[in-house]
Image: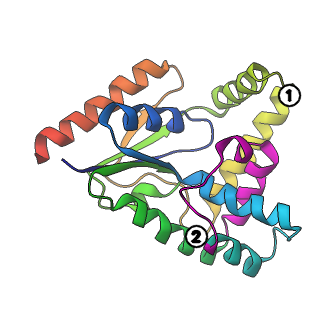
């Protein structure tokens, strides 16, 4: 059995948690494509490059190893913000999309989450989910996550940052964040992680029953 599950949505919508749960449940490889953009940004920051230098960002993208993405390092807020800036470069996106497609083409199937999986990276995926939640709910989640790790943050600042990232992601000319025409919409604003997982499982199981 081989199945590709494409999960898209804005920051802190719950798509990453959902993707990991589905990958574990169905024994599929998992790729958080957002980490690939963060890896590019992190390399630029480490090497002293400018986030506005498209050529340097493209070079960094070509050197990214999808098998060596350190989530702990790449989860830093500064890296996340920088990633949304380098992600607007069309050539960076082309380089990373090619790497992401290679990951998705493994024989056993895969789960990928990001901003353009169902529309660009894996338009032929058997299951496409578009996960959303209100900006306020997402800001609250991000705040609780920071505080759970011993950090401190301001809710209003987080909310403003999330809205800025949403605007960048949905407004960019190349591969904007939007649901695929055949994606299942999943609003997690008032759902527990378990409820969201069970809803997603329903879509996946239905697709498997229809195709196998």
Q: Residue at x 49, y 18 (%)?
A: 192
Say which of 174 and 58 sits in front.
58
Note whether residue 54 is visible.
Answer: yes
**Number of numbered discs on residues:** 2
Task: Tell me if mark 1 has few (under 14), some (14-19) or many (20+) residues whose alpha carbon lies within 10 angstroms of its own.
Answer: few
Say which of 205 and 21 sits in front.
21
Q: Is residue 78 magenta?
A: yes
Note whether residue 5 is visible.
Answer: no
**Mark 1 element type:** loop
Q: Residue at x 67, y 67 (%)?
A: 88
Residue labelled with disc 1:
153
Left or right: residue 52 versus residue 35 is right
Residue labelled with disc 2:
93
Q: Residue at x 26, y 57 (%)?
A: 107
Q: Position of residue 143 (x, y in %)?
A: 75, 26
**Mark 2 element type:** helix
Q: Which residues are magenta?
A: 62-88
Task: Tell me if mark 2 has few (under 14), some (14-19) or many (20+) residues whose alpha carbon lies within 10 angstroms of its own.
Answer: some
């Amino acid at each position: 059995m081989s199945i590709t599950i494409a999960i898209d949505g804005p920051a802190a919508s719950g798509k990453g948690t959902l993707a990991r749960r589905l990958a574990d449940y169905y024994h599929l490889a998992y790729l958080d494509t957002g980490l690939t953009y963060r890896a590019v940004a992190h390399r630029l920051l480490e090497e002293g490059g400018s986030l506005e230098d498209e050529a340097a960002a493209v070079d960094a993208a070509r050197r990214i190893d999808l098998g060596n993405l350190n989530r702990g390092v790449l989860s830093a807020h500064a890296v996340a913000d920088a990633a949304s800036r380098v992600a607007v470069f069309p050539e960076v996106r082309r380089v990373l999309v090619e790497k992401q497609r290679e990951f998705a083409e493994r024989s056993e199937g895969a789960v990928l989450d990001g901003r353009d999986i169902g529309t660009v990276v894996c338009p032929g995926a058997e299951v496409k989910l578009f996960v959303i939640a209100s900006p306020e709910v997402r800001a609250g989640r991000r705040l609780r996550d920071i505080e759970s790790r011993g950090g401190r943050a301001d809710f209003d600042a987080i909310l403003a940052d999330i809205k800025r990232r949403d605007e960048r992601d949905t407004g960019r000319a190349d591969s904007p964040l939007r649901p695929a025409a055949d994606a299942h919409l999943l609003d997690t604003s008032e759902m527990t992680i378990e409820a969201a997982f069970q809803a997603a499982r329903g879509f996946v199981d239905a697709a498997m029953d229809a195709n196998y």
